[in-house]
Amino acid sequence: MMLNKTDLALVLAEITPVLRGGWIQKIHQPQALTIVLDIRVPGETHRLLISCDPNSARLHLTTGFYLNPPTPPPFCQFLRAHFQGARLDDIRQIEHDRIVELQLTNKDGPRAIMCELTGLKSNLLVLDAERQILRDCTRQCANVGQAYKPPGQGDASQKPAPSRFTGLSASMHPVSDAIDTYYREQESGRTGDRIKTERLRVLKKTLKKELRLIEAWRSDLAKAATYHDYARYGELIKSNLGAILKGADHLEVIDYFDDQLPTITIPLDPMKSPHGNMDDYFRKHRKHLAAERELTPRIERAELGLARLRQELHEIQQGTWTPPATSSPRLRVATSPTARAIAQQPGPFRRFTSTDGLPIFVGRNARENDELTFGLAKSDDLWLHARGTPGSHVVVRLGKGTDPPSETLRDAATLALLYSDLKKSGKGDVIYTRRKWVKKAKGQAPGAVIVTQEKSVHISLDKIRLDALKNRTSHD
């Protein structure tokens, strides 16, 4: 759902006096069609979110967490080059339509960002002083370099629809906060759906893999069962070693283990000595005993695990499933064999598996922070820490030359905030960089570091994400 004209008029009447005259400190593009402007006004900083997503085109203040990609998109880079440090002179709605103009002044003079929040053709466009188009967010504009013309007013004669946001009581910006809350709840629901979809995918994949594994174990057990009588054959050969001729391919003996004392034929390998044949039979019988001892309980445990996974799969398919609030090793499924192997290793640190199946390590104290960062972590691993406050070092294991997936970065940043002094506030900035840009602070206590080339994200603790992470934890 996108904002209608009345929604925009109300939210602009509320936030324009607050933002007018402010300075743009930071610019982010957390999603392809969404930008967030950190605007500094005397005494505080506000975050203005603008989205030209056709399904949720909107403009409002936000307190939510929007994770930035490791590398800013080209449109974000353009905005930073031209508008970081610019003054926001005014915000106005064009002809009471779903078009909003941000009037700014940068080092080159007057500029404008046109926010066309008009549905399928929603777009963000940058204009110069002559109102010519310099850049657009969706790159669907064929008029770059030409004079800007607002899109046609197809519904100008229609009566404006009433606003769907009555505002939150006891709030400084009630309409904006109501809009922000609505879309954050929508995003939280979509996050829950993504977790459920991912869990369903993992369950199906794991069930298929476990079934193949059980089938292989049963095949090994059946093969080993053919060695059941081989201890007896070994004993009979042992009792008749002197009667076996060199190169013989069989031995006929009386089976004195049988009360009927039948004569049986025992196959021999003519290339081996009598002792060699005897040892072969004893060795294969030991293999049978080992298979019975190890494979039978292993298959039983795996079948119990399959039953639980099938039950969880059934609950998802029936719509009765909820993410477990606590971890259960028998229900935990890592999406990557490497991540699973690392997560199951005993040792220090809190250990988690990200949404994308990557291992995440969290130090418990200063000594572990130091050991994690300068012992376990590799140079290309991702390193995170809550900004400007005591807290845990967090490391994400990455392959060389790979960037962290956005969901993994979000998971790790959430953990860095959770295990810091910012936990009580539930929100704050988290810095992240490659491990190679983290150095020990000389002469300081263990865990003290100097960080360069860092980036940061502003996050709020997300219960759904935390529950999913705790469900994938290995050691607390």
Image: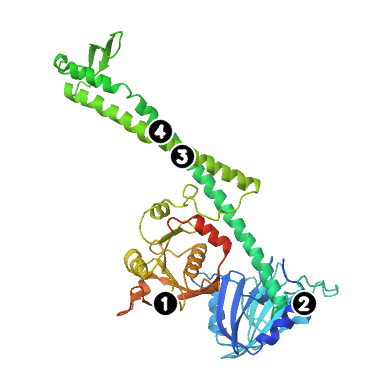
Name which residue lies at 57% across and 56% down.
195
Q: Is residue 161 above or below residue 207?
A: below
Of mark 4 and mark 1, the one earlier in the sequence is 4
The residue where tag 4 is placed is 296
Of mark 1 and mark 2, the one earlier in the sequence is 2
The residue where tag 1 is placed is 453
Of mark 2 and mark 3, the one earlier in the sequence is 2
**Identity of the amino acid at label 1?**
Gln
User: SS of the residue at dot 3?
Assistant: helix
Residue 85 located left or right of residue 214: right
Q: CA distance from mark 1 to mark 2?
A: 43 Å
Q: CA distance from mark 4 to mark 1?
A: 54 Å
Residue 102 located left or right of residue 282: right
Q: Residues within 10 Å of mark 4 (few under 14, many from 20)?
A: some
What label sits on residue 97 in the rendered view? 2
The residue where tag 3 is placed is 302
Name which quarter of the figure residue 371 lies in.
bottom left
User: SS of the residue at dot 1?
Assistant: loop
Q: Residues within 10 Å of mark 2 (few under 14, many from 20)?
A: many
Residue 21 screen position, x and y as percent: 64, 90
Q: Residues within 10 Å of mark 1 (few under 14, many from 20)?
A: few
Q: CA distance from mark 3 to mark 1?
A: 47 Å
